[in-house]
């Protein structure tokens, strides 16, 4: 797959293979404005190990996985609008070959 040649970005929709423009940009706890994320196009065993290191509770696994996929600290992800989070969560599930579940 190649990157989209379109210059027009649609909020809340992955752009090409690795740019996701947020429909609701926000300021992270570190004070940085987050307008888009660049999720990984593949998830490795090293990434899975990092998810396991970051989580003590099963309910945090999905959030940690999405954070690692997007290259964000978990704390930065927590204020993301749910409309933006859900498609990223689905992309994480696709990358790791897990069925999409409602949590």
Image (cartoon, rainbow, N blue to C red):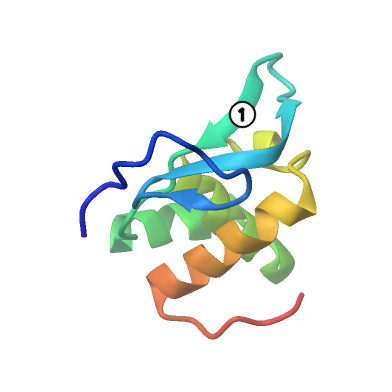
Q: In front: 73, or 23?
A: 23
Instruction: Determine the image quadrant of residue 73.
Output: top right
Q: Please give the name of the residue rendered at 48% of the width and 52% of the height, measured from the top-left corner.
A: 14
Element assignment for label 1: strand
Q: Nearer the viewer, residue 70 or 19?
A: 19
In the picture, the quarter occupied by the C terminus is bottom right
Residue placed most toward the observer, 29 or 35 = 35
Say whether residue 98 is visible: yes
Q: Is residue 80 above or below residue 27?
A: below
Badge 1 density bin: few <14, some 14–19, many ≥20, Cα 10 Å:
some
- Above/below status of 92 relative to 99: above
The residue located at (62%, 57%) in the rendering is 55
Can you give x and y, in whole percent of width and height, for residue 30 in the image?
68, 17
Q: Pick out the residue farthest to the top.
A: 31
State which quarter of the image contains the N terminus. bottom left
Q: Number of numbered discs present?
A: 1
| Residue 47, above or below 18 | below
The location of residue 80, given as percent across then percent down, is 73, 42
**Which residue occupies 34% across, 60% down?**
43
Residue 74 seen in this snapshot:
no
Which quadrant holds residue 75?
A: top right
- Residue 61 drawn at (x, y percent): 61, 63
Location of mark 1 (residue): 35
């Amino acid at each position: 797959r190649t990157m989209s040649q379109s210059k027009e970005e649609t909020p809340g929709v992955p752009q090409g293979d690795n740019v996701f423009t947020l429909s609701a940009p926000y300021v992270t706890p570190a004070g940085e404005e987050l307008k888009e994320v660049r999720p990984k196009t593949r998830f490795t065993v090293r990434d899975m190990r990092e998810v396991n290191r970051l989580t003590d509770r099963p309910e945090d696994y999905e959030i940690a996985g999405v954070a690692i996929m997007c290259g964000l600290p978990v704390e930065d992800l927590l204020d993301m609008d749910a409309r933006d989070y859900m498609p990223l969560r689905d992309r994480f599930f696709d990358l790791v070959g897990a069925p999409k579940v409602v949590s």
